[in-house]
Amino acid sequence: MKKEYKTVEKEAQDEFIEKKSRFIGYVCPVKTQAEATEFINKIKSKHWDATHNVSAYVLRENNIQRSSDDGEPSGTAGVPVLDVLLKENLFDVCVVVTRYFGGTLLGAGGLIRAYSHSSKIAVEAGGIITMAPCKILSVSVDYSFYERLNILLNDYKANIENSDFADKVNIKFSIKAEKVQSLQDKLTEMSNGKYILKELGEKFAKAE
């Protein structure tokens, strides 16, 4: 698997007013050009009456970078939105900035600043996270050990994906790949070798 990367955690939005023009920044995590296009079209449909719907996205897939000024003067809108994503070193992210013109021209410098700011506040609203190669693991423990396991997984910043309370407690979770051996060593020590982690696979997941 490739190395870790930064993206946004969730779809979000934020907005501000600049000289009576309303700028609404939308952000969404996307994996493919099709998903990015779908998000852009969704915002365009929602704000069909807007003056402009400027967009930009960066994908890990084939290292794709795209931006659109959507009628604003060339280089004053899409590129500043894209620049924010590149400066933050973000991947698999799409931003759309909707503008409702307020009657006052902002000039090239004003537009660049406004679109940059819109992109930045949208990204902040989405929350920047690190995605890293993680192992998906499971472990079954007795109820008497469950609380200690919970504390241990919390200490290792594991993402618990499923907890099944049957005759034993079965926990499925993901954790950064490089932490697995240390976690197993600690679990062995705490349980006198009673509990063994079972590896189910791997994926990119939110990691701390």
Image (tube, helix red, strand yellow):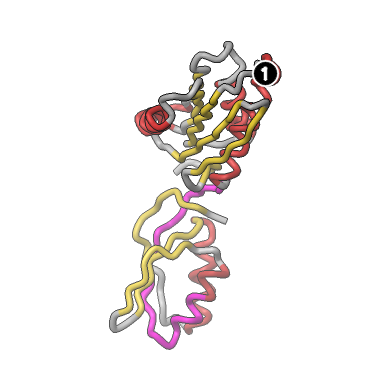
Residue on which disc 1 sits: 106
- Residue range (magenta): 128-150
Query: Is-magenta flag for residue 139?
Result: yes
Taking 25 as reference, is 159 above or below it? below
Q: Quadrant of the N terminus?
A: top left
Which residue occupies 52% across, 41% down? 13
Query: Is-magenta flag for residue 47?
Result: no
Q: Quadrant of the C terminus?
A: bottom right
Residue 104 placed where, x, y %?
65, 18
Task: Characterize the magenta stretch by its predominant secondary structure.
Answer: strand
Q: What kind of element bears circle 1?
A: loop
Of 96 and 56, nearer the camera is: 96
Identify residue type, mark 1. Leu
Relative to 146, is 3 on the left or the right? right
Furthest-left residue in view?
A: 167
Which residue occupies 50% across, 48% down? 9
Residue 54 placed where, x, y %?
51, 23
Which residue occupies 57% across, 22% down? 101
Which residue occupies 44% across, 60% down? 174
Of 183 and 51, nearer the camera is: 51
Furthest-bottom residue in view?
A: 144
Residue 196 placed where, x, y %?
40, 73
Dividing the picture into quadrants, the one containing residue 31 is top left
